Amino acid sequence: MNDITAALLKFRNERDWEQFHDARNLALALSIEAAELNELFLWKKDTQIDSVDSERVKEELADVFAFAFLLAEKYKFDVKEIILDKVKKNAEKYPVEKSKGSATKYTML
């Protein structure tokens, strides 16, 4: 993961784009890229979902990850650590015996 962040920072810094990468703009960019990912699935019927262009999904997902990594770096978060911490919190909110096979929110279990 450090290699990913380093590559993103190198790319950004070579272009003098750090000036645009405050937390607000990174969060907005992340949201916009997530919306572009969602757009690939917009108005598709269930039977069409599997035919969405996987290359476009890959490109948009990479953009989402890139801005998420840059935002994490802005706050000096360790991506691996914050994800594993969140998985642990979710495991407490969604115990297997109550949540297995269910999409019910933890407050309703």
Image: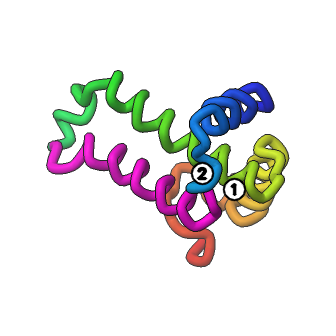
> Residue at coordinates 48% horizontally, 62% vertically from top-left?
28
Tell me the element at label 1.
helix
Q: Is residue 109 left or right of residue 39?
A: right
The label number, if any, that marks residue 13 in the structure image: none
Q: Where residue 62 appears, x then y in whole percent? A: 50, 33
Proximity of marks 1 and 2: CB atoms separated by less than 8 Å: yes
Magenta residue check for 20: no
Residue type at tag 1:
Glu
The image position of residue 73, as x and y in percent, is 75, 49
Q: Provide the major secondary structure of the magenta segment.
A: helix
- Quarter of the picture containing the C terminus is bottom right
Q: What x and y, as percent, mark residue 65?
A: 57, 40
For image coordinates 62% across by 55% down, the residue present is 19
Mark 1 vs mark 2, CA separation in Å:
6 Å
The question of residue 34 being in magenta is answered with yes
Residue annotated with mark 2:
100
Q: Quadrant of the N terminus?
A: top right
**Is 95 drawn above or below residue 46 in the view shown?**
below
Magenta residues, start to end: 21-44
In the rendered image, which residue does mark 1 sit on? 97
Question: Which image quadrant is residue 80 in?
Answer: top right
Location of residue 56 with respect to 64 vertically, above or below:
above
Which sits in the foreground, 88 or 77? 77
Q: Could you say whether the residue bearing mark 2 is in a helix, strand or loop?
A: loop
